[in-house]
Image (tube, rainbow, N blue to C red):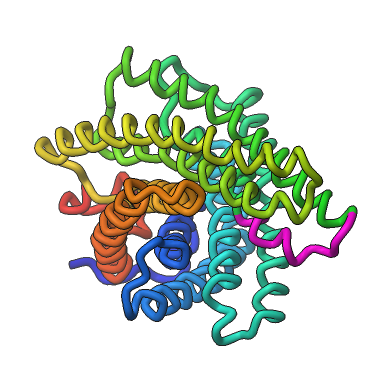
Amino acid sequence: MRDLGSPAEIFSNLTPNWYASIMGTGIVAAAAASLPWQPRGLHTAAFVVWVLAAFLLVALTVATVTHWVRSPGAARRHLLNPVASQFYGAPPMAMLTVGAGTLLLGRDVLGLHAAVNIDWVLWFAGTITGLAAAVLVPFVMFTQHELKADSAFGGWLMPIVPPMVSASTGALLVPYAPAGQARLAMFLCCFAMFGLSLLASIVVITLIWYRLAVYKTGEAAAVPTVWIVLGPVGQSITAANLLAGVAPQALPRPYSTALQAFGVLYGVPLWGFGLLWGTIAVAITVRTIRAHLPFSLTWWSFVFPVGTMVEGTSGLALHTGSDLFRVAAVAFYVALVAAWVTVAARTANGSFRGTLFLPPGVRPATDR
């Protein structure tokens, strides 16, 4: 066992992908709130998980600011790194996820007024930084990163998915926006971000498919990122159905009625693609585990994307009344919790030992 590194060592190697742990923890809580089946104790357990996610968000943000102050050169190098830079999409999604949980679960303790205000702050912070990541990271990729034909991987989706998360979490805030032009603008901005992220994701998913077909799965450590494709798929289903639910409060007919139909007409085909990709991802993961799959923070790729499928499936269950989607949502949630418990335990162990704060090249062999 290696002792936890010094604070200087920890902060010097702190990368933005740590926020993926908050994304994964937060979506375990948020997904429970909309689950079609609400057994006794689920809401309380979800609230506890949300508290944990909120605490981690505050703690990691303080640590990140310290990192930027004490190691500004390392922070700049992350942006210029073709892999590390992609995960600058994680902090915005962490803020948006915790904000949604505040409205869905935190209101029980904070009260509705405080919960809405906190969610507004986190939504604006997450949306602004998410849009910045969606522009800045591709810009740096296009102008400075040295990339090869086999460079495409699931992480390329990370900086372009935050606007989709803003669209779905923003839909929860639409009813609390002032009626009239302000609410309409809020709704339209969310729908525009839905399109922004969707079209960019289609381009990247196509590149990922091509890379897997031509260059195969590559290094075992990167295999979990294959699951990230489920993120924009599940999140877009979620956004389409949440926006459909609040459309009558922002738009007149026939547009609101059309969007309500769109939630299902779009969501069901995408859900089918999600099943296809999920099955392929399971097969690739099992194959890699048999050979050896080293633990790293990329394992959080197993969590948040599955959570988006839970939320999307729950939305389809609500709007179609289908028992198929109700059962599937619960099954996905069981898988989500199992993945979260496994990855969270391994992350806690690696954090306690200090190995996760070391550069990959100097980590003990047991962690590779």
Q: Is residue 173 magenta?
A: yes
Name the residue rendered at 54%, 30% in the picture: 201
Name the residue rendered at 45%, 35% in the picture: 268
Name the residue rendered at 56%, 54% in the picture: 93
Instruction: For residue 69, say whether it is visible.
Output: yes
In the image, is residue 266 above or below residue 245? above
The one of 125 and 81 positioned closer to us in this rendering = 125
The one of 211 and 209 positioned closer to us in this rendering = 209
Instruction: For residue 73, say whether it is visible.
Output: no
Q: Is residue 47 left or right of residue 140?
A: left
Callout count: 0
Magenta residues (range): 169-180
Name the residue rendered at 41%, 36% in the picture: 271
User: Residue 28 location, x and y as percent?
Assistant: 40, 63
Q: Is residue 233 magenta?
A: no
Outermost residue toward the left?
290
The one of 110 and 254 positioned closer to us in this rendering = 254
Outermost residue toward the right?
181
In the image, is residue 70 above or below residue 243? below
Q: Give the quarter of the figure containing the N terminus.
A: bottom left
User: Magenta region, mostly helix, strand or loop?
Assistant: helix
User: Residue 315 location, x and y as percent?
Assistant: 49, 51
In the image, is residue 210 above or below residue 282? above
User: Residue 279 location, x and y as percent?
Assistant: 26, 34
Q: Is residue 329 left or right of residue 259?
A: left
